[in-house]
């Protein structure tokens, strides 16, 4: 039996990426339908790290505080080799109140997002699989099949593909997923450790015959990642014994591993799409990019994909922004994705190498490099995704700068800045009466906050990045920028 239904936005996939899209769009007044192929949410911890930039954006959206209250904080990342600690990355240097990595199981992140979405009146439809999509000029037709075998043709104004690395929608649109599979085999495991392993830092152990990283989840529970080039962990035998063997041959600290909750053996794929849009279909999260789990970046990248896309989509759909604004989702996010995939691949190749020459170089160079403040600051900002920005995009071209920032840069969440943002429109900070007068003609597109920007003006986007800025008397520049991307109210 085939039915037909219409929806403004269909979201495919109910992991952190899809849930964030549903939460944001619903909050912005856009009706959505969110479906997922799995009959039940996954109980596995999977993606573990929640980074500072993600927490900054989720806090003002009413989600971050709950995550922080439940997670475990890692304030540094320590490098060990040759029986001792050789260097440390000081995550407390991040320019954020969330100057740590929050360790929280993905299952918990998904539960929190799902509960918030439910309070906004949206329920995830589970056991629903997408089988085909056809994008047209003004809509997309998506065929979905329920677990009961019935099919439904959904006519959506837009579709968000958050359906994971094996994305049906990506394959259906034939956009490709270029990249490579890295050579080493790896093991992930969630287990308990009895022994002297710090619970407030990420511990990374380097040896000529392997690599082990230990991420603290709190109360004696850890996520372990290790190279397994010899296939020590396989489908035969007791996995905890094999994982203990991998651990002991790299780590100098005597411990006992026990109470294994979950384990996976895998190879790392390092891939990303080159464009995030096909007609009416947008891609994000693992459907658009996959890479090494080292550094805990992937889930955060997907969440931030959707926070970038959602406000633009909402403003275009209600007529406040021009359709061209939607093209900036791909043009802004692809450079960020490309840089992160390249960085995690390089880091994985260096830190996980079993080449003895590479091992000697890394244990000599890491302490020297991390003895410099500049390197420490850059490393901390990279981990927290604080340094990602959108300079050089068409949306930021000729848009000016202010207070040491350029258009496209992250605006620091200082002195209540993010609490003052209109999360559904542009926020204009100014005391310039000429600029305020101009903004009155852009009601609904621009919200004015006075008393915060003497001598000039700055426009901050709902995702916390600088949209445009200028000095006193620059009203024509602001008007030109707004007219380029947005629709003046009649």
Image (spheres, rainbow, N blue to C red):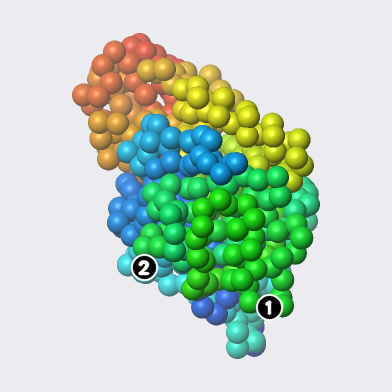
Residue sitting at 76 percent across and 35 percent down?
357
For the residue labelled by badge 2, is the local secondary structure a helix, a strand or a loop?
A: helix
Q: Is residue 118 above or below residue 282?
A: below
Residue occupied by mark 1: 237
For the residue labelled by badge 1, is the local secondary structure a helix, a strand or a loop?
A: loop
Residue sitting at 68 percent across and 65 percent down?
265
Q: Position of residue 134 (x, y in %)?
A: 71, 63
Residue sitting at 36 percent across and 68 percent down?
115
Q: Is residue 31 left or right of residue 473?
A: right
Q: Closer to the observer: label 1 or label 2?
A: 1
Image quadrant where residue 1 sits: bottom right
Q: Position of residue 69 (x, y in %)?
A: 30, 56
Residue 398 in sight in this render: yes
Graded by Cα atoms within 10 Å as few (under 14), some (14 to 19) or many (20 or more), the crowding at tag 1 reads: few
Q: Nearer the viewer, residue 384 or 37?
A: 384
Q: Nearer the viewer, residue 264 or 25?
A: 264
Residue 28 in sight in this render: no
Residue occupied by mark 2: 115
């Amino acid at each position: 039996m085939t039915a037909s239904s219409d929806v403004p936005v269909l979201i495919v996939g109910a992991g952190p990426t899809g849930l964030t899209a549903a939460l944001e769009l619903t909050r912005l007044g856009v009706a959505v339908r969110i479906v997922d192929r799995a009959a039940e949410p996954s109980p596995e911890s999977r993606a573990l790290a929640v980074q500072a930039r993600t927490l900054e954006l989720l806090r003002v959206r009413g989600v971050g505080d709950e995550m922080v209250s439940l997670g475990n904080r890692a304030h540094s990342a320590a490098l060990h080799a040759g029986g001792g600690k050789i260097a440390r990355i000081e995550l407390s240097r991040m320019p954020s109140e969330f100057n740590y990595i929050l360790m929280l199981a993905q299952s918990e992140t998904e539960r929190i997002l799902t509960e918030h979405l439910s309070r906004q009146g949206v329920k995830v439809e589970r056991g629903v699989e997408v089988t085909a999509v056809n994008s047209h000029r003004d809509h997309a037709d998506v065929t979905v099949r329920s677990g009961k075998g019935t099919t439904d043709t959904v006519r959506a104004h837009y579709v968000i593909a958050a359906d994971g690395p094996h994305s049906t929608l990506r394959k259906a649109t034939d956009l490709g997923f270029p990249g490579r599979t890295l050579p080493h085999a790896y093991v992930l495991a969630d287990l308990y450790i009895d022994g002297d392993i710090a619970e407030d830092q990420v511990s990374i152990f380097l040896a000529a015959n392997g690599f082990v990283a230990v991420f603290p989840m709190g109360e004696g529970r850890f996520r372990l990642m290790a190279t397994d080039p010899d296939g020590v962990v396989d489908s035969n035998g007791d996995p905890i014994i094999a994982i203990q063997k991998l651990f002991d041959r790299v780590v100098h600290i005597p411990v006992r591993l026990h109470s294994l909750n979950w384990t996976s053996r895998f190879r790392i794929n390092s891939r990303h799409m080159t464009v995030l849009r096909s007609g009416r279909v947008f891609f994000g999260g693992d459907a658009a990019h996959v890479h090494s789990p080292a550094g805990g970046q992937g889930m955060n990248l997907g969440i931030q994909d959707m926070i970038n896309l959602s406000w633009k989509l909402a403003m275009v759909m209600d007529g406040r922004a021009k359709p061209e604004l939607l093209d900036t989702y791909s043009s802004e996010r692809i450079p960020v994705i490309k840089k992160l995939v390249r960085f995690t691949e390089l880091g994985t190749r260096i830190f996980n190498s079993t080449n003895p020459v590479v091992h000697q170089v890394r244990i000599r160079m890491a302490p020297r490099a991390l003895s410099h403040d500049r390197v420490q600051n850059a490393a901390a900002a990279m981990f927290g995704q604080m340094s990602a920005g959108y300079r050089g995009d068409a949306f930021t071209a000729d848009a000016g700068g202010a207070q040491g920032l350029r258009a496209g840069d992250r605006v620091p969440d200082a002195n209540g800045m993010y609490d003052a943002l209109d999360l559904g429109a542009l926020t204009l900070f100014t005391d310039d009466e000429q600029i305020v007068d101009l903004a009155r003609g852009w009601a609904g597109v621009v919200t004015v906050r006075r008393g915060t920007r003497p001598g000039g003006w700055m426009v901050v986007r709902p995702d916390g990045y600088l949209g445009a800025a200028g000095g006193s008397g620059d009203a024509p520049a602001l008007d030109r920028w707004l007219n380029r991307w947005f629709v003046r109210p009649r």
